[in-house]
Image: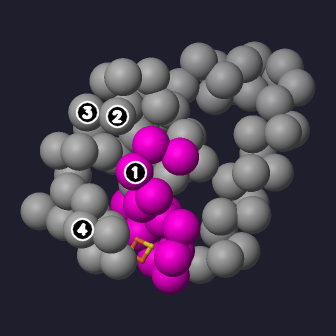
Amino acid sequence: MYVCNCFGVTEAQVKKHADGGACTPRQIASACKAGTDCGSCVRRIQALLGRDACPRRELADRGKPVLAELAELAELEDAA
Ligand code: FES
């Protein structure tokens, strides 16, 4: 099933990139361009990545600074 219709990126491809270490929508975008055109898939990509997949999210949950990552996400969401 396609997650990103603009670039024909499937759920399996996103999960493969996540398994390879991508843990933010921006890192997925760097790997396969998903989310870089209309942006409507960014929330689905975020959902696929899940809460537990990202070490930086764990830092945020513990109150550590991860503002650069949050700013990147906000940029992607604003583009949506
Ligand atoms: S559906 Fe992914 S960028 Fe448009």
Vertical placement of 37 versus 60: above or below?
below
Mark 3 element type: helix
In the depicted structure, whether residue 76 falls above or below residue 51: below
Confirm or deny contact between disc 4 and disc 2 (CB under 8 A): no
* Residue at 50% in and 32% down: 23
| Label 1: element kind | helix
Earlier-in-chain disc, 4 versus 2: 4
Quickly name the residue at label 2.
17
Asked where in the image residue 10 lies, by quadrant, the reply is bottom left
Residue 12 appears in which quarter of the rendering? top left
For badge 1, the amino acid type reads Cys
Which of labels 2 and 1 is toward the front? Answer: 1
Which numbered disc covers residue 16?
A: 3
Q: Are marks 3 and 4 in contact (CB under 8 Å)?
A: no
Q: What is the distance, in whole Å, between disc 2 and disc 3 at their CAs? A: 4 Å
Reading the image, the residue beneath label 1 is: 32
Quadrant hosting ligand 1: bottom left
Which residue type does callout 4 highlight?
Gly
Q: Looking at numbered disc 2 in the image, what kind of residue is underneath it? A: His
Category of crowding for the residue at label 1, using alpha-carbon neighbours closer than 10 angstroms: few (below 14), some (14–19), many (at least 20): some
Which residue is the extreme one toward the left? 1
